[in-house]
């Protein structure tokens, strides 16, 4: 009998000596036996189980972008795109990967109807050694769900995978598209045999690893929620468990603290919501207080079978000893992130017991650490930072790693090597701030140096309290010296005070270091506006200098005393202190004398002794020019320009401001260049050179925007608006004041908002008057004018309300009276009277 005979088309009967069998409608996995009489007893067909999704949470929030990306993968794309759709959602344990995928699958299946053939769901337990599903076992479960009986399932992995794909394709052809969800995958090897080959079968995978080697897969990295969504999740979960529960809204500050203590991790937030639902009388402050204790935080983040520590342990158990030790040591670093170079020093110095230089110079060590960091990031036990080459730990992972510390994990050698390295680089960077004639360092330009300092500063700030605990006694002082120019440049005065106090509190300081730390503390206090404390610090510095017979230092202390005294309004005492400083500096270095003269000039100007101030400043300028210090020269020129304005020598003021601005532009110091350009605008204004004044104010506003100084930018925009209005250009003035208002609103500055609103109201009023004079109104123009009138009144009223909040009753009343005058001008007398009454009430002490 031939093969054709065996699979003929007869009805199974016998005609003469010919035997014919028809076998169809089944799955044949072995030899088919042919005989004259065959009795078939077919088992009842298995029912496919294609609706096995877990129930979605009713309080899902904060994942709109990721959900939209998954829906883009899952939606039908027609015959034009015949790619097998696969997406991998990866992230830290507890970050909400499964919930996101379940939400996406439920919406695609039930709401959109994109998968009429059903949904298969299997938990692979990829990170759980006790329950991990091997691919062949997972295929057995998937085939069973598709209706394939156990006796029809082959034993080999490859055969099972082929049958699984064939059955999926057949099912999709007969019933429609199918979705497969593979949850908690451990490795790509565990997933590959389970991936369909038919474009009508989509797959969603969740994993704690990135699984970037899965071909054609869309990769979605899931991170913790932001603060607002974290509080929203907490609120929704508590309200769902206990409708009408308002504790989250009533204790919003505590809810925000709880979200922060939870690291904005959804698992931790759901644990807290369960604790709150369990005890409806428990205030949020109670939970916030318990979570504030970092030593016991992970103990308290558990409820029933939800446990943050257990979620992390599954990932940690997969690490090699080398990777596990690296994670524990990285957790010792207190900063918000770490670059690969710093991590190489931290880890390698600890391993080798040296200063870390070999880690810095040995490329193999650097490359090895980089590979470890990349592996930890693939496992989502660390995260990539703002740019490649920077890494960070989730706050709760850091606590978890701290708990696992072993006796040799102190990290003392590595931390000492790291801080020594960072101090050296910081000193190289700030060299560019101290002088434009800086010697060659690892940074070629000031811009490069500032970028490094801005990036690493949060880490240096976090390392400051660690420095006194390290074996090298003077690291705190070295850190202060390395950073003081940067702290002054970025106006981080409060931090500067703390760095100086930390240095003074360290051990092993010699007398010279003690003097410098004490003097720096006084300088930081002075810049912070803490003048009484400055006097005490400067007096202590002066004592140290006299004990050391350090006359240059004594002069610096006198100068610091003078500045504090001047700021306190004690101008005569300040001038005497400056004279002592100058007398002490006779015969000392030229730069010291130039600095003393500059500060002396400032004090004289504060005392309105402007002629003397100008002469002192000119002497300072001459000395800085001789020294070739262009940045100092520029600053003195700008100060001299201000003095010339005050005594009415406007051309001289303009000349000084122009030269100072030009020098600062050449040096790339945009912050100081903005201040110089603002002074230049004032000088133009005094000379009635309106167009140049407008350009200078606009330029200053743009520069301050570029360097990130919103308050200064708002001042420039307000001045620009006032200038434009005075020049009869109200429409342009409106734009300037609106921009200034936006700046004030973004940064919560009520004074800035009030000034911008008053300026805006006046500019709008002028624009309406200008339109009245033109008197060409069509219907649309009249409507626009009416809108401007109403907006002007609203701007005045909003400004007055803000001033009232600030406690400035007189200015609020004046603004209300301005609004009243404008209302009368518009013929709205009744409203004007009401506003005038409000102003009078404010002035008389009413509300």
Image (cartoon, grey):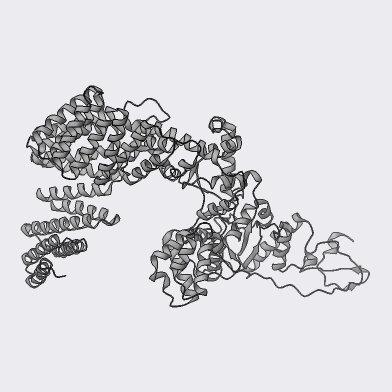
In the rendering, at what x and y percent does residue 841 appear? 11, 69
Which quadrant holds the N terminus? bottom right
**What residue do we see at 14% from left, 41% from top?**
571
Image quarter in which the C terminus is found: bottom left
Percent position of residue 167, x then y = 70, 63
Q: Is residue 791 above or below residue 502?
A: below
The furthest residue to the front: 547
- Between 343 and 10, the one nearer to me in the picture: 343
Q: Residue at x 46, y 70 (%)?
A: 236
Using the rendered view, name the quadrant where residue 94 is placed. Answer: bottom right
Res. 647 visible in picture? yes
Q: Is residue 597 left or right of residue 300?
A: left
Q: Nearer the viewer, residue 377 or 517?
A: 517
* Quadrant assignment, res 815: bottom left
Q: Nearer the viewer, residue 607 or 809?
A: 607
Q: Position of residue 16 (x, y in %)?
A: 93, 71
Write the residue at 36% across / 31% down. Answer: 512
């Amino acid at each position: 009998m031939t093969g054709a005979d065996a699979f003929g088309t007869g009805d199974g009967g016998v005609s003469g000596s010919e035997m014919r069998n028809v076998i169809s409608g089944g799955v044949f996995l072995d030899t088919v036996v042919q005989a004259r009489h065959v009795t078939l007893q077919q088992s009842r067909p298995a029912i496919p189980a294609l609706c096995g999704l877990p129930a979605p949470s009713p309080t899902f929030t904060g994942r709109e972008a990721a959900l939209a990306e998954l829906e883009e993968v899952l939606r039908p794309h027609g015959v034009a795109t015949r790619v097998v759709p696969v997406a991998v959602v990866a992230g830290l344990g507890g970050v909400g990967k499964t919930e996101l995928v379940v939400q996406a699958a439920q919406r695609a299946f039930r709401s959109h109807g994109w998968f009429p053939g059903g949904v298969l769901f299997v938990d692979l337990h990829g990170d759980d050694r006790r329950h991990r599903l091997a691919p062949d076992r997972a295929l057995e479960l998937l085939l069973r769900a598709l209706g394939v009986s156990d006796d029809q399932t082959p034993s080999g992995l490859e055969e099972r995978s082929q049958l699984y794909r064939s059955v999926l394709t057949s099912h999709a052809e007969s019933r429609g598209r199918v979705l497969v969800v593979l949850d908690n995958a451990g490795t790509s090897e565990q997933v590959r045999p389970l991936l369909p080959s038919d474009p009508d079968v989509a797959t969603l995978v969740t994993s704690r690893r990135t699984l970037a080697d899965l071909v054609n897969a869309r990769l979605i990295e899931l991170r913790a929620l932001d603060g607002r969504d974290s509080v929203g999740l907490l609120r929704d979960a508590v309200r769902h468990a206990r409708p009408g529960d308002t504790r989250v809204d009533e204790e919003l500050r505590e809810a925000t603290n709880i979200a922060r203590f939870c690291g904005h991790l959804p698992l931790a937030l759901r644990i807290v919501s369960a604790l709150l639902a369990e005890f409806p009388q428990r205030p949020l402050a109670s939970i916030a207080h318990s979570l504030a204790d970092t030593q016991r935080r992970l103990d308290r983040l558990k409820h029933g079978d939800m446990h943050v520590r257990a979620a992390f342990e599954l990932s940690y158990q997969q690490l090699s000893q080398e990777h596990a030790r690296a994670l524990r040591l990285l957790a010792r670093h207190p900063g918000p992130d770490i670059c690969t170079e710093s991590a190489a020093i931290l880890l390698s110095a600890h391993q080798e017991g040296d200063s870390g230089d070999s880690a810095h110079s040995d490329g193999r060590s650097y490359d090895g650490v980089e590979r470890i960091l990349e592996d930890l990031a693939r496992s989502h036990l660390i995260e990539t930072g703002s740019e490649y080459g920077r890494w960070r730990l989730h706050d709760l992972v850091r606590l978890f790693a701290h708990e696992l510390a072993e006796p040799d994990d102190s990290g003392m050698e590595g931390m000492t090597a790291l801080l020594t390295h960072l101090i050296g680089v910081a000193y190289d960077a700030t060299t560019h701030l101290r002088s434009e004639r800086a010697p060659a360092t690892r940074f070629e330009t000031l811009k490069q140096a500032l970028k490094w300092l801005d990036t690493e500063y949060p880490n240096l700030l976090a390392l400051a309290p660690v420095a006194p605990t390290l074996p090298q006694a003077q690291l705190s002082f070295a850190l202060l010296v390395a950073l003081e120019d940067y702290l002054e440049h970025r106006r981080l005065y409060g931090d500067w005070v703390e760095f100086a106090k930390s240095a003074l509190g360290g051990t092993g300081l010699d007398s010279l270091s003690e003097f410098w730390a004490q003097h720096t503390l006084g300088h930081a206090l002075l810049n912070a506006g803490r003048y009484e404390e400055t006097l005490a610090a400067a007096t202590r510095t002066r004592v140290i200098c006299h004990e050391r017979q350090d006359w240059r230092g004594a002069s610096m202390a006198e100068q610091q005393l003078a500045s504090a005294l001047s700021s306190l309004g004690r101008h005569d005492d300040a001038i005497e202190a400056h004279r002592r400083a100058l007398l002490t500096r006779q015969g000392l270095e030229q730069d010291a004398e130039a600095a003393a003269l500059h500060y002396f000039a400032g004090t004289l100007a504060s005392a309105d002794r402007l002629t003397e101030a100008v002469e002192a400043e000119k002497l300072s300028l001459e000395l800085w020019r001789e020294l070739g210090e262009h940045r100092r020269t520029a600053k003195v020129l700008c100060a001299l320009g201000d003095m010339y304005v005050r005594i009415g020598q406007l051309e001289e003021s303009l000349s000084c401001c122009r030269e100072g601005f030009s020098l600062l532009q050449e040096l790339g110091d945009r912050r100081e260049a903005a201040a110089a350009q603002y002074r230049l605008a004032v000088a133009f204004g005094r000379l009635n050179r309106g167009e140049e004044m407008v350009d200078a104010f606009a330029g200053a506003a743009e520069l301050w925007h570029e360097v990130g100084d919103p308050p200064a930018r708002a001042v420039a925009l307000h001045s620009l608006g006032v200038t434009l209005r005075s020049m009869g250009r109200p429409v342009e003035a409106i734009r300037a004041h609106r921009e200034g208002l936006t700046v004030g609103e973004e940064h919560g500055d009520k004074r800035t908002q009030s000034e911008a609103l008053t300026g805006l109201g006046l500019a709008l009023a002028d624009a309406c008057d200008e339109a009245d004079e033109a008197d060409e109104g069509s219907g649309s123009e009249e409507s626009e004018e009416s809108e401007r009138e109403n907006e002007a009144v609203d701007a005045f009223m909003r400004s007055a309300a803000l001033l009232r909040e600030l406690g400035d009753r007189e200015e609020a009343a004046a603004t209300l009276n301005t609004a009243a005058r404008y209302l009368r001008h518009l013929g709205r007398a009744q409203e004007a009277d009401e506003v005038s009454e409000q102003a009078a009430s404010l002035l008389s002490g009413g509300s």
